[in-house]
Amino acid sequence: MLPPLIEPGPAVGVSSTEPEDVRRQRERFRQALLEYLHASTTHDWDALRRARAHLLDEYLELGFLLHGGARCALCQVTVRHPTAVTAFHRDGDCTDHSCLCVRCLVAEAAVSHHVLQRVGPMLYEHYAPAPCRVSWRSNARAA
């Protein structure tokens, strides 16, 4: 059993000059974190997966409200939730990108051996899809 959480008072860590939307997002992130911690004590893996995805969404949105977006390092399109990406190429080289849009991230994953995406303290690995193998069978009838 986990020990109870010690929750901060209303004025701890929150600036009084902080905009209302940032304050609301902080509360949504806090609620998502509590839901994730509650789901981690159960053995319902689907609930844990949903709570982890919700926590990630709220974390990224809070980061956007605090720091703003960025530009994709490859195509210069605006990215709402910038994340650092390292692409490990098939020839052994690796490339670090400060931010990639979803389209460029999928393209890098397709041409690289694998791609690491850093979101806060978590790492996501994207692997290139396996080559498609199509086999043709003849339907020859036995005579």
Image (cartoon, helix red, strand yellow):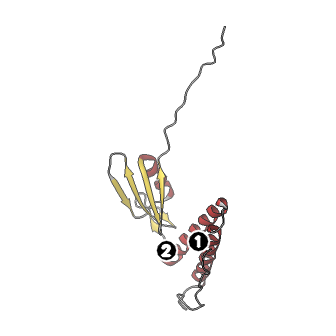
Residue beneath disc 2: 68
Among the 4 quarters of the image, the one containing residue 39: bottom right
**Disc assigned to residue 141:** none
Find residue 74 and report its horizontal and vertical position in percent: 40, 57
Left or right: 45 in relation to 93: right
Residue 58 point in image, percent of width and height: 58, 71
Residue located at (65% from left, 72% from top): 38
Q: Give the CA separation, mark 1 to mark 2.
A: 14 Å
**Left of 135 or right of it: where is 112?**
left
Describe the element under mark 2 as helix, strand or loop.
loop
Q: How many marks?
A: 2
- Mark before the other along the chain sequence, 1 or 2: 1
90 or 47: which is nearer to us? 47
Q: Residue 58 carries which label?
A: 1
Element under label 1?
A: helix
| Image position of 11 with respect to 97: above or below | below
**Residue, x 32% and y 48% (percent of image)?**
92
Give the quadrant of the C terminus: top right
Crowdedness of circle 2 by 10 Å Cα count: few (<14), some, many (20+)? Answer: few
Which callout, 1 or 2, points to the residue nearer the camera?
1
Q: In the depicted view, which residue is nearer to us: 142 or 1?
A: 1
Quadrant of image for the N terminus: bottom right
Q: Is residue 6 above or below residue 38?
A: below
The residue at 48%/76% (across/down) is 67
In the rendered structure, the answer to whether residue 40 lies left or right of residue 110 reads right
Q: Which amino acid does label 1 sit on?
A: Glu
